[in-house]
Amino acid sequence: SKAIPGSPPPTMLRAVVAASCIAGCAAFTASPALFTTSAAPRATSAISGMRMQAKSKAIPFLSQPENLDGSMAGDVGFDPFGFSYFFDVKWMREAELKHGRICMLAATGCLVQEVVHLPGPAFSQKMALNAWASAPRGGMISILAAIGLIELISNRFALTATDMFANPNRVPGDLGFDPLSLGTNPANKARFELSEVTHGRAAMMGFSGMVHQMIVSKQAPIEQLMHFKAVDSTVFKLGGAAGNLGY
């Protein structure tokens, strides 16, 4: 075929198209050197090559993160933002377990708060958000101070990702608290570890949902289940719901 006057030669067009295809494929292939902190030899074994191409169980269309090898309870390769490449996995698991434990207690407290109260008008609120505001300030400050002291002492004042796990034998979230000796059997210990992290993740989602539900509906969780009220469209507006409801 004849070339159109003023157009590039066919050979050049083919080269440009081939280069574009190769670049498009390379865009979806993560470079190992992008996330490594030390130089690694170019040659890799067949086993490591297969491991790099393994897919995440949680997100099947993404590759399995290198630092999430499934050795921790509940590890299904969920790391869409790549945090495991930049932070110590043990430090993040420590944070996950502690936040999960707190939220399990908080979710339970939101429900118990509607039924059980301490004596006195300051503790008569059904909604947890109102109870937080009406409780004596001294008591709330004492609770926060106690939590802070427990955190500092249990970690021996090593709280950052660089020093918390200076001891390689330290297990994330293991404070030696097992009064019922549930972890003496390895099989039971593995099962309870998985249960804890799974329930902790659910509690973090559940507690967040309860807080937002109370802000929007101005009803406690059990009360809303028993006596549901639709949200007033004149009050609830995108971007201004919390402010319009007084929160």
Image (cartoon, rainbow, N blue to C red):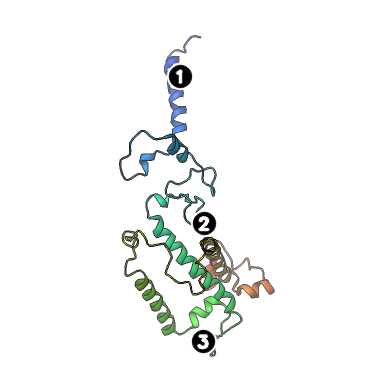
| Residue 195 in the image, given as x and y percentages of width and height | 55, 63
Q: Earlier in the sequence, mark 1 or mark 3?
A: 1
Q: Is residue 84 above or below residue 233?
A: above
Q: Is residue 241 something one can see in this rendering? A: yes
Picture quadrant of residue 169:
bottom left
Residue behind mark 3: 122
Quick one: 123 or 236, which is closer to the camera?
Answer: 123
127 is higher (above) or lower (below) than 239: below
Q: Is residue 1 above or below residue 208?
A: above
Report the residue at 56% width, 85% height from top: 117
Whichever of callouts 1 and 2 sits on the residue coming sooner in the sequence is 1
Most extreme residue toward the bottom is 120
**Percent coordinates x, y for residue 3 in the rendering:** 46, 11
Whole-percent x and y of residue 8? 42, 17
**Circle 2/circle 3 CB separation < 8 Å:** no
Marker disc for residue 14: 1
Q: Residue furthest front?
A: 185
Left or right of 144? Residue 215 is right
Q: Which residue matches tag 2?
A: 74
Name the secondary structure under disc 1. helix
Identify the residue at horizontal 59%, vertical 75% (top origin): 111
Question: Between tags 2 and 3, which lies in front?
Answer: 2
Residue farthest toward the top in the current orientation of the protein: 2
Cα distance in 3D space between marks 1 and 2: 49 Å
Kind of residue sitting beneath label 1: Arg
Q: Position of residue 170 (x, y in %)?
A: 38, 62
| Separation (CA) of disc 2 from disc 3 | 41 Å
Q: Earlier in the sequence, mark 2 or mark 3?
A: 2
* Nearer to me, 68 or 233: 68
